[in-house]
Image (tube, coloured by chain):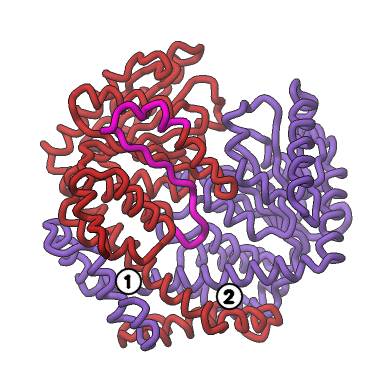
Chain colours: A red, B purple
Amino acid sequence: MSIDYAAQILEGSPRAAARLISWLEDEDPRAYEWMPKIYPHTGRAYIIGITGAPGAGKSTLTDKLARVIRKSGLKVGIIAVDPSSPFTGGALLGDRVRMSELSNDPEIYIRSMATRGFLGGMAKATGDVVRVLDALGKDIILIETVGVGQDEIDIIGIADTTCLVMVPGLGDAIQSMKAGIMEIADIFLINKSDKQGADQLCSEVCSRLDIDSQIKTTVWTPLVTKAVAVEDIGIEELWQAIETHRRHLFDSGRFQEKRRDRIYQETLRMIHNELFRVVREHLQQDGKLDSAVEDIMSRKIDPYTLMREIVSEWLSIPQLKKEAS
Amino acid sequence: MSIDYAAQILEGSPRAAARLISWLEDEDPRAYEWMPKIYPHTGRAYIIGITGAPGAGKSTLTDKLARVIRKSGLKVGIIAVDPSSPFTGGALLGDRVRMSELSNDPEIYIRSMATRGFLGGMAKATGDVVRVLDALGKDIILIETVGVGQDEIDIIGIADTTCLVMVPGLGDAIQSMKAGIMEIADIFLINKSDKQGADQLCSEVCSRLDIDSQIKTTVWTPLVTKAVAVEDIGIEELWQAIETHRRHLFDSGRFQEKRRDRIYQETLRMIHNELFRVVREHLQQDGKLDSAVEDIMSRKIDPYTLMREIVSEWLSIPQLKKEAS
């Protein structure tokens, strides 16, 4: 502990932040020596989620939005969560390409994260990285992720404002992927709005929202905006829409509520991950799991019974033992 | 326990199977009274994963393949995992539509599963449903899922043979989604092969596989087949390709290896889920987490320290306590 990473991060060192994030990704125990030290300095950054189907232009939009936000003097962090390439590590390449484009501005920090294996839990990892960038002094943190799958919905749950990027011409099958994510979007952005079908998509979204607002008594009616991200059109308007939503959250008290919910979910997730990590390591170390697998293979025991035995044996709280058995 | 669901399932009752699957989906404790009882009778069915981008025609292909398999007298189960609509429950609708098409054959059992909330874990749920259909006497189980996201990759990891469905004209962005899944596919099926671009896609896939086989010393070189699923073209050939891969797995000894790996992962996943269920319920019951969240909100404590305290308090094995602290 000769280098004080927490102090360096709080002073705004991107190198110290990068180191801590790498430890988090590797589940290196050093990460958890430093995270408690930066935690008291977090909770200040505003978090924006950018989601949508592959090909919707999320990366371009995120980059353009980052530049617009920078004009108002705010510092920006970008977390690009790439679930596409768990094997190829493609996220790292994308990282480097984008880094070079925005690298002339030291106040924009970009980090790509490839989807981790079974054990990781992307939402937990993303939450940890958000906290590092928050402590680093970023005012606005943009999280960019593909809007499909439960992992991604959990990731988007971290955001204060969620923007769903849609494009004309991706076809019904693609758009229907976002049925779930549509219900958690605060802003709908129709990207590539100069393309054929943009107006139709826009009116489809609007009429869907219209129906929703008649059925539900929602406090917030999502905004719909248009953009052509590659040509820098509509980005200022998107930023204004985000600002409108942010004001709504603060004025209505929803901001504190949302943060409380998030901390609840995150804490639960952390406790669970840590318990599992310790249990898993122990199972693997003493070869207990390997021999159990042989017994399951030959159908001598079943995994359900094994699971109950392990959980009730290893947890020390009497109520838990009772529940688990 | 007046009705013996296990006995009924083993006798082939689809109603008993449907009931047990519903309990599994709802995490009803009754599910775990019956799962250990059917477990000794599982492990016999061969599992085929069908994956690909939305719009690739997976559902049609799966249905046609099921009919071809039925011709050889084998009984078929279909599990359609729909990650698109965690909120709307859209999977159930699709289920009904498809049921009506294949319902004239009582030996085809179809079950759609919508993505569950934060608590579920689709891969674990899918594995449980596979075991129910296996016990029900299905010889071949087809799992159909969208090929993006970690959840879906975990789901596909359950299969003995994985078939990636690709189509011409979906665009680079869509195809690149499958960078991760490409590396676990045993068979590449070019669907809609009468469309423009099919030959090009086919040669792209082949040359990619060619490069891979030069770099890696893989035991299995994936097969590439073509189909027009809506017109029933190429389905027999797909089934033959699956048979070829199945024979390869048995002859090479890879089958047992794959099954062992899967049981290892599944058992870990079960322990993971059970830990979470027990921890969550206990934390919610005693209100401990609610008061902790308030302290975290005000930055009096941090969730990392809280997590360690709880984990070291709850683990009853001394070595575990040491690791966790």
Depicted B271 relative to depicted A247: above or below: below
Region in magenta? A97-120
Secondary structure under the numbered disc 2 in the rendered image: helix
User: Could you say where residue A322 lies in the image, as x and y percent from the top left?
Assistant: 36, 86
> Is residue A114 magenta-colored?
yes
- The amino acid sitting under disc 1 is Glu
B102 to the left or right of B223: left
Q: Which residue is mark 1?
A: B281
> Is residue A200 magenta-colored?
no
User: Could you say where residue A33 lies in the image, as x and y percent from the top left?
Assistant: 28, 65
Per the rendering, the mark at residue B215 is none
Q: Which residue is mark 2?
A: B35
Secondary structure under the numbered disc 1 in the rendered image: helix
- Labels 1 and 2 share a subunit: yes
Residue at figure coordinates x 81%, y 41% from the top left: B224
Q: Where, by quadrant of the figure, is residue B248 drawn?
A: bottom right
Residue at figure coordinates x 60%, y 64% from the top left: B127
Depth order, front residue of A150/A141:
A141
- The amino acid sitting under disc 2 is Met
Depicted A51 relative to depicted B287: above or below: above
